[in-house]
């Protein structure tokens, strides 16, 4: 082999190899230091595009999970408040029932009334202080707005849920094809005549049972007055029907009934053709051309992206009614896309709003109110029961939304986060085993290349030695 002093291609190749190994070694150490396979676009352009897309989705999912966590905290406050309010309303119902009994003294009734006053005041305080993040929950700010074209026929409108993605007002047609009826029983007693014998009658209705003792000579007017005096206990009233007396339920629908039984006495009290127990009938209603559920005059409808209820006035049969949802409600973002928003209607539940227009409201049970315990034939028990039903209904809707809407959304988002995180790690993450092995190989090759370069350079030294020899 000839010895030359010119540039050695071997040396150049060795220098190039060492430079390449140094670059590879630097890249490997960077990946080991950062834990990332992609540290810049040049590392993997296509992988970086996929990585940015996945990170964007992951950020949106994390934001949605934060929203859901905050929403669940708010609804937990709402649920706790409703539990306390439910307890107060149950207490008011019990006090109203005890305070309406004819056997108690004036001082006892006054004591029951004082307790009702305190309970109603406590309820209003709870409603006014139930807030989350500085916003009141049940003072009416979160109710969904709704109007009707006939306030005389459609009352007590409440919207529980709507689709916030629907722009503008949403109008639903209401067609009442049959009115709700009461349970009723007609007696043989007339309004003009008096009983020919002492009679004990048991009246049973939706609310309960009362036993009424009627003395010989009791007139029809006094019979009606005795039944009316017990209506808060039984849910049964009385009125003249032609020449006879009719007992009728105070409410309408299939759960309203009248049962009359003569316990003692020779008086024939009921018409032979009249059954001992008669039951009312629910209204027949179509909303948005779909059959709605009805309990008496109370109508419930879920469809067209909304859930609502309302009461019909007495004997309404009308095909030209409508309700219009105008917006509002507490809007929750369940996921990252715009179609996942839901507005929940949280109605005001202070004492002035719990109850019903045809019965009265809890605030009417206060001292001086139109349905306080000193008012004969008051509807205190019926009002308290209606209020209890409203609170229970709202609590059920809040709980259902929390569990099945927020809960399900959170579970799906958590699973999505897990999948996205795994995908990001797979694309971005460095394989430490592979990178460590590569580093060792690169360092071995680099050491060998440097040694070989030293040997190659010794050729020049040998030529110089010959010249100097």
Image (tube, rainbow, N blue to C red):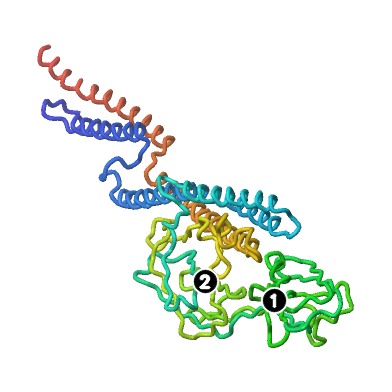
- Identity of the residue drawn at 47% across and 61% down: 345
Q: Is residue 51 visible?
A: yes
Residue reaching furthest to the top: 469
**Residue 313 drawn above or below residue 359:** below
Q: Which residue appears at 76% of the width and 66% of the height?
A: 209
> Would you call the spot at circle 2 few (<14 residues within 10 Å), some (14-19), or many (20 or more)?
some
Where in the figure is residue 6, as x and y percent of width and height? 11, 28
Which residue is drawn at the image coordinates 51% and 83% (left, top)? 175
Q: Is residue 36 above or below residue 75?
A: above
Residue labelled with disc 1: 238
Q: Nearer the viewer, residue 235 or 460?
A: 235
Report whether residue 419 is seen. no
**Which residue is at the front of the view, 39 or 92?**
92
Q: Judge left or right: residue 229 versus residue 267.
A: left
User: Marks 1 and 2, Cα distance to the nearest angstrom?
Assistant: 27 Å
Task: Locate residue 216: give its quadrant.
Answer: bottom right
Residue labelled with disc 2: 310
* Tag 1 near tag 2, CB within 8 Å: no
Q: Sort mark 1 into few (<14), some (14-19) or many (20+) by Cα contacts within 10 Å.
A: many
Q: Where is residue 228? Give x, y as percent.
A: 69, 71
Of circles 1 and 2, the one toward us is: 1
Q: What numbered label is drawn on residue 285?
A: none
Q: Image quadrant of residue 194?
A: bottom right
Residue 401 location (% of width, % of height): 52, 58
Where disc 2 sits, the SS reads: strand
Identified at 28% across, 49% down, the residue is 45
């Amino acid at each position: 082999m000839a010895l030359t002093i010119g540039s050695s291609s071997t040396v150049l190749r060795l220098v190039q190899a060492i430079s390449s190994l140094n670059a590879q070694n630097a890249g490997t150490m960077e990946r080991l230091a950062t834990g990332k396979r992609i540290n810049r676009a040049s590392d993997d352009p296509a992988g970086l595009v996929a990585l940015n897309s996945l990170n964007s989705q992951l950020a949106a999912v994390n934001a949605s999970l934060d929203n859901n966590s905050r929403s669940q905290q708010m609804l937990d406050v709402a649920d706790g408040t409703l539990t306390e309010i439910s307890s107060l309303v149950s207490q008011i119902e019990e006090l109203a029932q005890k305070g309406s009994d004819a056997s108690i003294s004036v001082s006892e009734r006054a004591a029951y009334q004082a307790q009702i006053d305190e309970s109603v005041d406590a309820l209003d305080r709870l409603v006014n202080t139930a807030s989350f993040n500085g916003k009141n929950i049940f003072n009416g700010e979160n109710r969904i707005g709704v109007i009707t074209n006939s306030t005389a026929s459609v009352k007590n409108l409440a919207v529980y849920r709507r689709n916030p993605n629907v722009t503008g007002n949403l109008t639903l047609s209401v067609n009442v094809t049959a009115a709700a009826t009461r349970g009723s029983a007609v007696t043989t007693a007339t309004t003009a005549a008096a009983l020919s014998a002492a009679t004990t009658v048991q009246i049973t209705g939706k609310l309960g049972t009362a036993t009424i003792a009627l003395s010989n000579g009791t007139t029809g007017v006094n019979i009606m007055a005795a039944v009316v005096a017990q209506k808060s206990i039984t849910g049964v009233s009385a009125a003249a029907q032609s020449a006879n007396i009719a007992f009728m339920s105070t409410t309408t629908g299939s759960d309203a009934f009248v049962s009359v039984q003569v316990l003692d006495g020779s008086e024939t009290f009921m018409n032979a053709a009249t059954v001992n127990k008669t039951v009312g009938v629910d209204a027949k209603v179509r909303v948005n051309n779909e059959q709605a559920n009805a309990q008496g005059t109370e109508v419930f409808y879920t469809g067209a992206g909304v859930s609502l209820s309302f009461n019909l006035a007495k004997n309404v049969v009308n095909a030209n009614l409508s309700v219009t949802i105008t917006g509002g409600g507490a809007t929750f973002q369940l996921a990252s896309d715009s179609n996942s928003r839901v507005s929940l209607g949280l109605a005001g539940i202070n004492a002035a709003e719990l109850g019903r227009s045809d019965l009265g409201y809890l605030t009417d049970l206060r001292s001086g109110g139109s349905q306080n315990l000193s008012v004969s034939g008051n509807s205190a028990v019926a009002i308290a029961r209606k209020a209890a039903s409203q609170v229970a209904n709202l609590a059920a809707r809040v709980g259902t939304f929390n569990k099945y809407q927020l809960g399900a959304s959170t579970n799906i988002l958590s699973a999505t986060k897990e999948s996205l995180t795994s995908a990001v790690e797979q694309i971005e993450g460095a394989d430490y085993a592979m990178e460590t092995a590569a580093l060792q190989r690169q360092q071995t090759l680099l050491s060998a290349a440097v040694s070989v370069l030293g040997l190659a350079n010794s050729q020049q030294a040998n030529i110089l030695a010959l010249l100097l020899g």
